[in-house]
Image: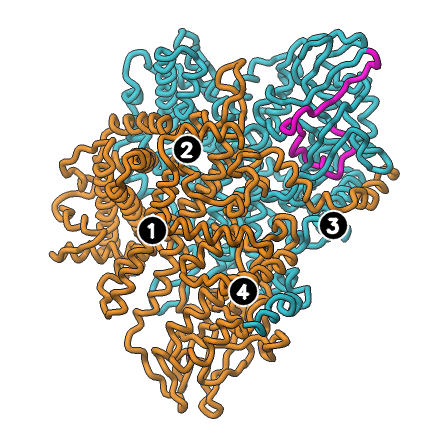
Chain colours: A cyan, B orange
Amino acid sequence: MNPDLRRERAAATFNPELITHILDGSPENTRRRREIENLIMNDPDFQHEDYNFLTRSQRYEVAVKKSANMVKKMREFGIADPDEIMWFKKLQLVNFVEPVGLNYSMFIPTLLNQGTTAQQEKWLHSSKGLQIIGTYAQTEMGHGTHLRGLETTATYDPKTQEFILNSPTVTSIKWWPGGLGKTSNHAIVLAQLFTQGKCYGLHAFIVPIREIGTHKPLPGITVGDIGPKFGYEEMDNGYLKMDNYRIPRENMLMKYAQVKPDGTYVKPLSDKLTYGTMVFVRSFLVGEAARSLSKACTIAIRYSAVRHQSEIKPGEPEPQILDFQTQQYKLFPLLATAYAFQFVGAYMKETYHRINEGIGQGDLSELPELHALTAGLKAFTTWTANAAIEECRMACGGHGYSHSSGIPNIYVTFTPACTFEGENTVMMLQTARFLMKSYDHVHSGELVCGMVSYLNDLPSQRIQPQQVAVWPTVVDINSPDSLTEAYKLRAARLVDIAAKNLQNEMSHRKSKEIAWNLTSVDLVRASEAHCHYVVVKLFSEKLHKIQDKSIQAVLRNLCLLYCLYGISQKAGDFLQGNIMTGTQITQVNQRIMELLTIIRPNAVALVDAFDFKDMTLGSVLGRYDGNVYENLFEWAKKSPLNQTEVHESYHKHLKPLQSKL
Amino acid sequence: MNPDLRRERAAATFNPELITHILDGSPENTRRRREIENLIMNDPDFQHEDYNFLTRSQRYEVAVKKSANMVKKMREFGIADPDEIMWFKKLQLVNFVEPVGLNYSMFIPTLLNQGTTAQQEKWLHSSKGLQIIGTYAQTEMGHGTHLRGLETTATYDPKTQEFILNSPTVTSIKWWPGGLGKTSNHAIVLAQLFTQGKCYGLHAFIVPIREIGTHKPLPGITVGDIGPKFGYEEMDNGYLKMDNYRIPRENMLMKYAQVKPDGTYVKPLSDKLTYGTMVFVRSFLVGEAARSLSKACTIAIRYSAVRHQSEIKPGEPEPQILDFQTQQYKLFPLLATAYAFQFVGAYMKETYHRINEGIGQGDLSELPELHALTAGLKAFTTWTANAAIEECRMACGGHGYSHSSGIPNIYVTFTPACTFEGENTVMMLQTARFLMKSYDHVHSGELVCGMVSYLNDLPSQRIQPQQVAVWPTVVDINSPDSLTEAYKLRAARLVDIAAKNLQNEMSHRKSKEIAWNLTSVDLVRASEAHCHYVVVKLFSEKLHKIQDKSIQAVLRNLCLLYCLYGISQKAGDFLQGNIMTGTQITQVNQRIMELLTIIRPNAVALVDAFDFKDMTLGSVLGRYDGNVYENLFEWAKKSPLNQTEVHESYHKHLKPLQSKL
């Protein structure tokens, strides 16, 4: 092991294993996760070429092979629990993606949620057995987040009892679905349903797109890959164009809405239930933000402990770059953020399962707040993690730019989370809608509960926005609970300002919608402040649940750093709201510098606690043993440019030029 | 042309051509630039495959071919002026890089700057004629920004009158030089010079690495490609390891320092002159930041005018996404930043040439400030542009993630600017060193001049840091000049705080260096505020030089937006320094929203004025004619996954699995 890393680990004030147990949920979970990881690491079938050295077509092929292998092995190993599947896949995939993934994550769940029992009987077995390889085709070239704008049509023909599917325009071509380009033979297609001359809006249809056995596109179907992207090179994100393509009536998923054989449309009883999947995926993305940022922090912090550069004192050996205050200031707030998001991710998962059980028993009461919270937190955590991953990369200097660092792959695989499953600004505005509704409730004398209950205390009818936060409060910058109060005041103030500006715009304009648009920057700001408060609150509350004193002390410092760094970054809000004074902000900045020094000796152990295997990180710079430089040289030798005869392009292009000049 | 874009262009309040002339420097420059661009666009030799669909090896080959072609054509067309070469290359390269580029940008200039007349006679002709293809090998695997840490040695052997070059450790292997991996046959190598048993520090040596004619690596040389990176796929960034590799004494560049045949070392008269190239490259990068961000803005704003999505009023057609306040708030401050950096880039270029002439006449007086300014502005503009390019990409929603948007390529080609040619944090600290020196001058009663002259007014000996900025000032938020004053006060305050904190640390600790490290976050903050002030100042001053009223009005609004947006983002600094009140910050935020509405009708014309050819943007989304969706479909069909037989991987990996389950 690299002597620097050995020294770092020996100097830690706590046992990282204990934090690992907290992050996994229990020591038993840690044990089982490692058991599964060892299965993979010891299985020769899972050894494969480093994607970085392959062409896109080769990457796709390796990914299909891995996908197939994974399905086989999970059955072999008896891995069926969703958490265990995730552990299995995460290690296996190393920041990459699997072409048949959507069959399991979207096709089958949609069939289960929206298909009748008969439909499930017909398709479920084949899709589990991969006779049917399904994907989910919703997004179109011209239409994304705004679902009502989708143009694909499904027109019912009672004569043949078929739906006729059409992509009437270029913009209506289905675009982006994973696995659609080459891998899938079926898709669940979202289309505007027309029957008896009337449009009934979006419905889901099971559409065969390739012939089983030959895998050739069926007549009337135009399908292919949408071309190279920033990342997701292994994934065949695809397009789908349908020309008068007929499917049987039974292929419409009819658990809720129905079309009778004669074309009569039967409305669903409730349409709130489709909420569920969205909420699940978004709350999952919060966890993804935590995991991706944790990986990037692991790499950047380990490398910063191994890398020696420049000088603090002239004549002395070059110090570890982790000893530079500027490097600590770059990385430790991100590490604190990674921990904050880990706890928020765990909370979201828990809450989702709790509320989902309630839904199973017919209790939908908490769904609106959960929906609003997941939307905002998805946006808040993915935006933050997105920028933070790049900061980690650049904190590795030039080497961060090489794929050997692993961080470019973490980034390009994570960054779509900011725009998919609901574009982040739109998500923030959904949260804002809930905040405005809650504000109106309070305004009309009703109390609100849950995370927005602070709105009950708003004395907003009496005073001006700027003075909202003059509630008597003395912020103790060494108390996470007190800092949570400060964030609460900030959120309350920004919600109040947005609500007042919205009212003001409404009184000046005719339309509520135009007023909403003209207030939307304020509304996003309010949502961000609300989400920031929720994160701070959950982190602070987590501290109270930790028994071990040494662990509590370490996490408390991270929590303080997270809170104070946010205040320093958004000092204007805290000053303008009279939540803190200029002198306190100066103290905050000083305290941050002290915390950097306090956290420094534990930094490596804090990333070790995330317990990522080298295989999962896919990074030469971030290796557990810190054996960086020798491995970098070995890695480089595998470059495709080093595999081909060196003179070819020289002889072909440069040599002729030499003789001419 | 797309009807939305036609309407946008018709609605503009000014003629974009006039701004293009300002950006080019003169109408004549615009004319000549377009002439050169037309040469390229009409030349069939310059048509080539879209890089996005090629493998790395293919990309490298195409790039070498283009490089060779470019050399040939520039001679043919008589293009020799550096600006014209840049126009030529920029259009040709479309955000990509050329393997033989370093021969012209580093090898030849270093030979000219540091070689004797005899050395220039020996190597210049061959390197211009490409018999010698040179690169510049400075960075090592373990050593970057801190040059003194380089480990490569050149030991003089008087017996044979040769230097013996060695890479004594893994970390000493030269790493990163462009064109080193496969293309070059010579390198200028930076190595620690040893002669007569003593080390004399870094010197430059001309080192043959491959045999001319066969292009095979010479004995004692290990050379190759360092492997795949985030971007720069066409570039063979390489490694170089030397084992007792001998070169003649004459291969040391000896214009300044010399080693006599007997091994006697002769010191250079001054070592300030090597400054020159660094300053030049960094000031060039400021312009690059402007150009890259301008490109990203062009794509995102054109696409936002073409893209219709969601709804502002229910029932009405989907609006252009550029009509959403949140979209304007994302893009217009970035557009304003692009313009700000364009003017800063032009100023840097001008200043560089002016000061360089002075240097030619022996006047080095302005060099220290120029050096400090380029370091800080390089960091400030590249960091800002880097984040801004990604914001532009995400403002294009899902499509931004596709290489068809062109923005991922702009990003990965630009982002190394944050870490190369001096890592940005180190750059900020160099500027801080100059600020602290200037502060000390003032402190000891001397006046300072240039951009730091505001330090002369600091009443810092009398009052506390928090109160520095209580100078009587009323900020007029509608006056760029008044806002410049506000930025000046902020810079003065943060420089003052950093200086006081530095003094304070020094009084508590033994070493100046440790105090410096413990103040470095404050020092970076001070440098950033200084650079921000310089940018605001240059933008504001530029307005006074513009004659045409319609143009002045448009640019004035952009300048105001740039200034106010910065204040809104850094409100804490302006409040804490008592430069502005909370009420004024509220007014700033309101004024920003008004400016968004004012700029909206001119947005497309403002990016048209950058006058990027579609070829330069390399973007389907950002096309001048707005013909986005049809082209997206055509583009996708070229995907490598669509070129290979669709069933292969299905039959190989998935079909066997189907029968088994």
Q: CA distance from mark 4 to mark 3?
A: 50 Å
Residue B346: image tag: 1
Mark 3 belongs to chain: A
Residue B603: image tag: 2
- Tell me whether marks 2 and 4 sit on the same chain: yes
Amino acid identity at mark 1:
Ala
**Element assignment for label 3:** helix
What is the magenta range? A159-187
- Tell me whether marks 1 and 4 sit on the same chain: yes
Amino acid identity at mark 2:
Ala
Q: Is residue A334 left or right of residue B556?
A: right
Q: Is the Cβ of the residue at disc 2 closer than 8 Å to that at disc 3?
A: no
Q: CA distance from mark 2 to mark 3?
A: 52 Å
Q: CA distance from mark 1 to mark 4?
A: 29 Å
Q: Name the residue at 65% across, 58% down.
A: B57
Residue B51 appears at what percent x and percent y?
Answer: 61, 51
Residue A347 appears at what percent x and percent y?
Answer: 55, 29
Q: CA distance from mark 1 to mark 2?
A: 22 Å
Query: Is residue B537 a member of the stretch shown in magenta?
Result: no
Which residue matches tag 4?
A: B72
Amino acid identity at mark 3:
Phe
